[in-house]
Amino acid sequence: MSDNASNTPRFDGRAVINGQRVDARDGQTFDCLSPVDGRLLTPVARCGVADIDAAVAAARAAFEDRRWSGMAPAARKRVMLKFADQLIAHADELALTETLDMGKPVKYARAVDVNSAANCIRWYGEAVDKVYDEIAPTPSTALALITREPVGVVGVIVPWNYPMIMAAWKIAPALAAGNSVVLKPSEKSPLTALRLAELALAAGIPPGVFNVVPGYGQEAGSPLALHMDVDCIAFTGSTRVGKQIHVMAGQSNLKRAWTELGGKSPNIVFADCPDLDRAVEAAVGSIFFNQGESCNAPSRLFVEASIKDAFLEKALALVPRYQPGNPLDKSTVMGAIVDKVQMDTVLRYIESGRSEGAKLLAGGEATEPVKGGFYVQPTIFDGVKNDMTIAREEIFGPVLSVLSFTDAADVVRQANSNIYGLQAAVWTRDINKAHGVARALRAGTVHVNQYDEDDITVPFGGFKQSGVGRDKSLHAFDKYTEVKTTWIRIDSPV
């Protein structure tokens, strides 16, 4: 990226295949537009089947000649640490790119996205030479080794809401374990992924090991999921597309398919909440963070009836600080929706809430703090019923649905009455209630008296239709390795 005369960043939208920047084989491109103000950022390679074939071939060749997988874990670690260092060295550039590409406030792109992606890459680099294999208990006539080996060529498809972080969650454990990777970023936010590939090369990851192929889902994503020489496909995105990924994996070579999908996370606040102000700040801050474009956003807020009025009074007082602003302004805390399609989707859900009888307390409209951009006011509905559309479906926007309850068993039933099971939260000072409700909630992560304070050391993923498999923590290595048993006969002379 460089600056031209108008001080607008200039980006390279070409794919990265086998260590080289290349156009799509057929020369096609698509326009990458900024949701901040609608400006054209750059044409991006509109890759298709031929480009996916080339990237997979490069990844396969790199895996088979062991230029990366054959390195000692300690050697791969050193390169991964340099990769993480490259992100930090280019942090301001990456943050600006992320903001222009998908609309999040630049201060969070810098403080959260760049730092989290770098930390993830560093963490898996550090972990890879500290994970031991196993020896099984055997008779004296045998030695049984249980070892992990890289699965081979890993296809990765990531969404537009956290482009760098979602990529890092998948490529870091996959690369650290010795795999080769073909990454297909969202067509709505491809630019930081392309830059990551360049930074990986600069850090010493060999050509062909990490390839990035931008394009549309049907034209590039589907060929990757269907490819007969891809050993594993890791996907983050909608449940609708995730189901298709599993079908394509089965229709092709039965590749391992790992999916992190949608959520409609319940946030349950009991009357004995130990700190009501903290609970309010977490409920409001978490749903409006990243413009509500988070799969784990606590979009269903269940508040015990006796404290609901007090809770909502405090919540509404916080709403003005989340009014959308220019994402390039370092004081902005809520930025732009990723594009007009998503903005229109959010507005349709808001209209659905109105028409189904929910009470609009705040927001509910599009706004335009920057001309040509896509922005939605922070929105809160009260009087929501669990069977309303806004309480059942993932909105992926700054919309909070507030429900009330009087009984612990009933609120758990309501919380679990959803196709998703990604995250949940419980606020109570009663240790028995906290443990009991947490155990009863069908969710991959349950937060107690906080929301989203967890880190890279714990798994991330969900129950039910929130996906299959886990990102983060040492558990992520399970997705990108095969377990091998080697049983050795020993006829000892002594």
Image: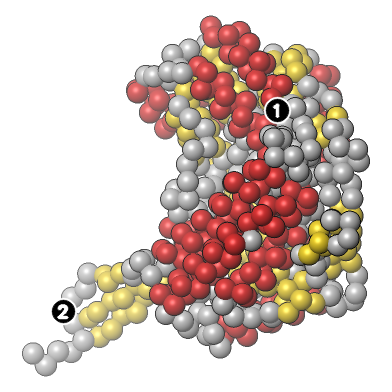
The image quarter in which residue 35 lies: top right
Q: Which residue is mark 2?
A: 140
Q: Is residue 318 above or below residue 452?
A: above
Left or right placement of residue 123 versus residue 375 in this view:
left
Q: Please, which colouring scheme is shown?
A: secondary structure
Q: Amino acid at mark 1?
A: Tyr
The answer, for residue 61, to whether it is visible in the render is yes
Q: Give the farthest residue toward the bottom.
A: 493
Name the residue located 69 percent from the left edge and 35 percent from the top edge: 331
Camera-nearest residue between 267 and 338: 338
Earlier in the chain: of badge 2 and badge 1, it is 2
Image spot of residue 74 (x, y percent): 40, 75
User: Residue at label 1?
Assistant: 322
Q: Residues within 10 Å of mark 1 (few under 14, many from 20)?
A: many
Q: Quadrant of residue 94?
A: bottom right
In the displayed structure, 125 sits above or below 276; it is below
Residue drawn at 62 percent across, 25 percent down? 284
Residue at the front extreme, as displayed = 5
Crowd class of label 2 (few under 14; some 14 to 19; many from 20; radius 10 Å): few
